[in-house]
Amino acid sequence: MKLLEGKTAIITGGSRGIGKGIALVFAQHGANIAFTYSSSVESAKSLEKELSIHGVKIQSYQSNAADYNESQDLVENVLTDFGSIDVLVNNAGITKDNLLMRMGEEDFDKVIEVNLKSVFNMTKAVQRTMLKQRKGSIINMSSVVGVKGNAGQSNYAASKAGIIGFSKSIALELGSRNIRSNVIAPGFIETEMTAKLDEKTVDIWRNSIPLKRGGSPEDVANACVFLASDLSAYITGQILNVDGGMLT
Ligand code: NAP
């Protein structure tokens, strides 16, 4: 069964990792997809080709989600190209890990801008369209780290915890217009972001997870399909942990 037939979704950071996984599964479920990236032009173009076999409309856009004006322009362009926006997945994110002792101001600000301000930028940019349509689903990618903190990631944890507060507030503000806002908190998902870690650290992570494995982008994408689809029509303001039981 195709759960997203006829819906148009914007996915930020779709060129790699979890965002790419979401684009693949959304396309299988019949969604038209506008996805963004920061610099990976080649991967974005090859993903466009890969997704088009599903017979849906696909377009990639190079757009910095941390930039307010670029986000406004992006949404204008998507509306021109697609005609509507039903789903926004705020997935773009970066890490710049360090202990507080060694963390510079720039690394704090950059992570907050790309991970948290981007969610404000994009939500603000789609708001008018979703209000007019009187429907919409916004899915914000937080992290288990935003819920419980992590040594060496105070900037990242702050950005991901901020997303939770923002998302719950938007759920309260826009619920009366049938616009839903939910958070996904992935645990340890094996992508390029985690490939930067050494193998020993990765093994420690895997062993500490009740399901005894890292998650895949597809695991997160399946949760996104649920929150994007009408199956979750009565669910807003929630955090869905996709973490193999890590937070249990
Ligand atoms: P990833 O493999 O590093 O991919 C990041 C994506 O975001 C890429 O498509 C990248 O584009 C894009 N991006 C980066 N900065 C951007 C910007 N300023 N504007 C627009 N796009 C930008 O990361 P991932 O592991 O898939 O993570 C995706 C999301 O899940 C992030 O928000 C991350 O915090 C969250 N998360 C990940 C894990 C995990 O274990 N992997 C766990 C919890 C939460 P380019 O390819 O052009 O650089």
Image: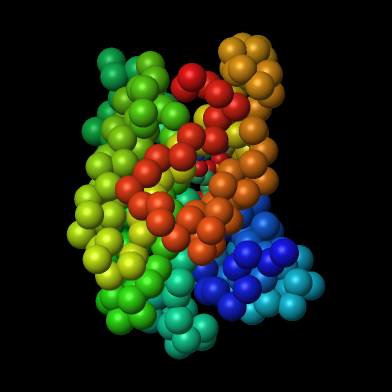
**Looking at the image, which is closer to me, 114 or 127?**
127
Relative vertical location of residue 237 with respect to residue 180 in this rendering, above or below: above
Asked whether, in this view, residue 233 is left or right of residue 18, the answer is: left
Image quadrant occupied by the N terminus: bottom right
Q: Quarter of the image holding residue 151?
A: top left
Colour scheme in use? rainbow
Identified at 51% across, 68% down, the residue is 9
Residue drawn 55% across the image and 23% down it = 245
User: Measured from the top left, where is residue 89 in percent x and y?
Assistant: 46, 58
Q: Residue at x 60, y 27 (%)?
A: 244
Q: Residue furthest front?
A: 234
In the image, taking residue 78 as reference, residue 5 lies left or right, namely right
Residue 174 image offset from top left, x and y in percent: 25, 63
For residue 24, say whether it is visible: yes
Q: Is residue 187 left or right of residue 31?
A: left
Image position of 56 with respect to 149: above or below: below
Camera sees residue 125: no
